[in-house]
Structure formats: structure tokens, C-alpha cells
Amino acid sequence: MTRLVSSNALHAIAVLAVIFGHGVVQAQTNATTNSASSTNEAVRTEQIRAACVSGRRLICGRVLKVSLDGIVVESGYTNLVRKAFEGAWLIPGTAVASRATNLVESQEPDSFCVGTVFLTDLPRPRGGGKVAVKPYDYVVLRGYPAGTYTYSTVGGIERTVRRFSVGLETAIRLSLQGPKKDPDN
């Protein structure tokens, strides 16, 4: 009888060892999987950061539409970058500016952006709050590429444009999220 009890006890211990041993191996596998996942995410984030820095553009243009998330800008008004407007990112619509003819966007960082774009993460005034950007005002800002944005024009036609963010961290976050639609539709 003693032999039977001890063989049953040994059998039970062996079963528990297998069960708990499997749990340890599974926990190690999960830790390894989580570590690899976070490493892949970090690598992807750094790749997006590098693409944002190399794709940054100088967005100087007329505001076409003001949205809750940002503004739609017709960029390519290179004559806004002049001494009279130095230091200002928002220029009233009464300023005299014209779109450059035959302007082609370069692939170099900090080159002029050409075409209609969506710009988000606008600068805030020193005292807090929001700046009152109105349609037909002008902006001069550096933007980092952040995917695409779809909005509706007055006639209800949907347009998809490049999305830029003034902040680098916001551009990285938006690029990870993917395309966005205008919530004002």
C-alpha cells in the first residue's frame, strides 16, 4: 500500500511539473513575443520619423477650408516668404500674394509644398486658446507628412489630399493611425 501511495504521489508530482513547466515555457514565449513586437513597433516608428523628417515641406498658401481638425491650404504662394512677413505664421487675407507659376515641388527637405494639402496641429498663441484662422487667410508653416485626408468641397465632392502636421510627434502618431476623413461632412 505504501508503494501505491508513493507511486500515485510521484505520478501527481510529475503531472503538476508538466503543467507548471508548460506555464513557465509559455510565459517565456509570451515575453519573447511581446519583446519582438515592441522592437518591431520601435523600428517602424523610427522609420516613420525618418520619412517625416526627410519629407518635411514649407507650406505657404491660402486657407481654403477651416475644419475642427485643421485647415485645407492651397500651397505654393512662395512670395509669402519675404521680410515683411518674417516671424508670422498667419497672415491676413488682405495681404497681397500670388501663386507661383510653373512651380514644381522638390524632393528635398524644407522645399516648398505645391498643391492642396491638409494641415493639422497648428501653433497655439502664448496665452493659450485657439487662433482664429479664417478662409482666405494665408499661412507659412513647416509641415511633416502625416498620410492623407479626405474632405468634401462645397458641391459635396470628396477630395483626398496629403496631410501634414506642424508637430513631428503628431505626424508620427497620425502616420501610424492611417488615413482620415473630415468629421465636418
Image: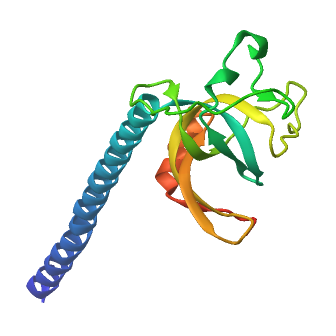
Q: Is residue 94 left or right of residue 104?
A: right
Residue closest to the eye, 22 or 182 = 182
Q: Quadrant of residue 165?
A: top right
For the point 56% across and 48% down, the residue is: 163
Q: Quadrant of residue 149?
A: bottom right
Q: Quadrant of residue 100?
A: top right
What's the image's color scheme?
rainbow
Residue closest to the eye, 117 or 99 = 99
x, y (%) of residue 4?
Answer: 11, 87
For the point 45% across and 29% down, the residue is: 53
> What is the quadrant of the C terminus in the image?
bottom right
Q: Is residue 52 left or right of residue 143?
A: left
Residue closest to the eye, 154 or 67 = 154
Q: Is residue 43 left or right of residue 117?
A: left
Residue at the extreme front of the image, as rendered = 101
> What is the quadrant of the N terminus in the image?
bottom left
For the point 80% across and 32% down, the residue is: 124
x, y (%) of residue 93?
Answer: 84, 35
Residue closest to the eye, 38 or 84 = 84
Residue at the extreme top of the image, as rendered = 83
Asked if 42 appears above or below 78 in the picture, the reply is below
Number of numbered discs on residues: 0
x, y (%) of residue 166?
Answer: 63, 34
x, y (%) of residue 17?
Answer: 20, 69
